[in-house]
Image (cartoon, rainbow, N blue to C red):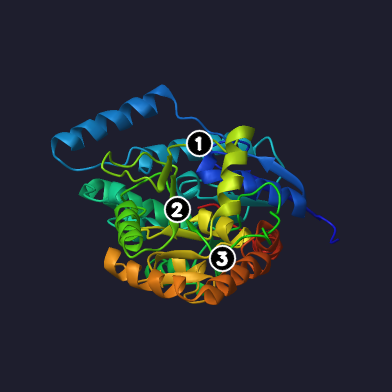
Amino acid sequence: MKEKEELSVGYLTASDPLDKRSWSGIHHSMYQTLSNEFKVVHILGPIHKNFFIKGFNLFVHLVHLIAKKRYNQWHNILSSRYFALRLKQKLKQKKLDVLFAASGSVEIAYLKTNIPICYLADTSYGQIENYYEEFSRMSRLSSLEGNLIEKRAIDNSTTQVYSSKWASEYVAQNYVSKKDNIFTVSFGANINHVPKINTNKDFDGKIHLLFLGVDWERKGGDIVFNTFLMLDKAGYNLQLTICGCTPPKKITHPKVKIIPFLNKNNKEDNDVFLQLMNQAHILFVPTQADCTPIVFCEANANGIPVITTNTGGVNSIIEDGLNGITLPLESGAEEYFLILKQLLGDRNRLKKMANNSRIEYEKRLNWEVWGKKIREIILYTAKNEQHES
């Protein structure tokens, strides 16, 4: 086993990385992984906004609502300057060799420090605006602030790491002049233990389709249900489980099971989740917008191929025809019905995709691999002197 590096790393987040719910569990997984690679990892979060910042942001937000425009209460210059002030105070108490800022553009944009910064994200402001619904119809002020913060965060960091080529290529083309310091490293699966593959899973009988997502509309829930109805009508022996959200009341069928919410921090709920993964043959999530869906990595860990959409950073996890199938964004239930009909008619192909999924997890979609790559990037970052900006 490789020895831990002597570097002192500051793990910078606005939220608490010890909270497994923070950033879908990514912050917690990254902290654990960094702790395996470096002898000293200082947690620099959470950083809570004071009453004045919250009040001002709410006031500006309400003014924009009246004008029928959105203002991002969290991604703005006032918040960024406040975070920089708080972090500056925290950094005086620590002796650090490098700062690792995970999803931390707002936190580092106005931070003045000589400590080299490694900035990690799954997208950038210019890319996410008008891609996710909650980032659409932004006011001109909010849009200008968001892009300024992103540009300053990138300029203020020595290296930038992104979870997909979709994200890193956008930054290289739109924000950065020094492309040699941009890296792409896939995230891992947020699992406590590497699951054993269910070698007794029957691919010749009933097929279990699993939909996982908290946002029914964005994750393509209607497409899933309508595709299921078409497959059921065609005579296929299927079970569909919907987990993570409460779909519209019209979504009802004898062969559809709905589990609105599971808290993976709770042992009983986590056991239910593990059972769902154990019995699923296909994860069916035709997402309409996604940066890096961690649940796809978790599916791969369990040897479950993913049927999804070629959008955002999805194709950095799912390679079409290898560990799943990706269809164009404009595809509807009819197109998914046809592709699933082909797959269900060739169970050997389905089995091969299941095997490939586990191989892809072991090869690249786990936090151990992420940690080894990030270790080298952080070492490279630490060697580059950062000047206060």
Expressed as whole percent of the image width and height from the top left, the position of residue 84 reads 50, 40
Query: The residue tagged with tag 2: helix, strand or loop?
Result: strand
Name the front one of labels 1 and 3: 3
Of pointers 1 and 2, the one earlier in the residue sequence: 1
For residue 235, what is the image quadrant? bottom left
Classify mark 3: helix, strand or loop. Answer: loop
Residue ID at (67%, 69%) = 363
**Of the residues under marks 1 and 3, which one precedes in the sequence?**
1
Residue 174 drawn at (x, y percent): 37, 68
Q: Position of residue 350 (x, y in %)?
A: 53, 71
Nearest the viewer among 338 and 159 is: 338
Residue for point 43% across, 68% down:
166
Instruction: Give whichever of 86, 206 is nearer the camera.
Output: 206
At numbered mark 1, what does the secondary structure look like: helix, strand or loop? helix
In the shown orientation, is residue 385 left or right of residue 182?
Answer: right
Q: Residue at x 40, y 37 (%)?
A: 79
The answer for how far apart the CA atoms under marks 2 and 3 are is 13 Å
**Amino acid marked by disc 3:** Phe
Whole-percent x and y of residue 105?
Answer: 46, 50
Q: Earlier in the sequence, mark 2 or mark 3?
A: 3
- The structure residue drawn at horizontal position 27% and vertical position 38%, both measured from the top left corner, is 249
Q: Is residue 81 above or below residue 204?
A: above
Q: Are marks 2 and 3 in contact (CB under 8 Å)?
A: no
Look at the image and tell me whether residue 212 can be seen: no
Question: Residue 85's mark?
Answer: 1
Q: Which residue is mark 2?
A: 239
Total tally of numbered discs in the picture = 3
Q: Which residue is mark 3?
A: 203
Horizontal arrangement in the rendering, residue 256 relative to residue 198 (left or right): left
Pointer 1 local density, CA inside 10 Å: few below 14, some 14–19, many at least 20: some
Q: Residues within 10 Å of mark 3 (few under 14, many from 20)?
A: some
Quadrant in which the N terminus appears: bottom right
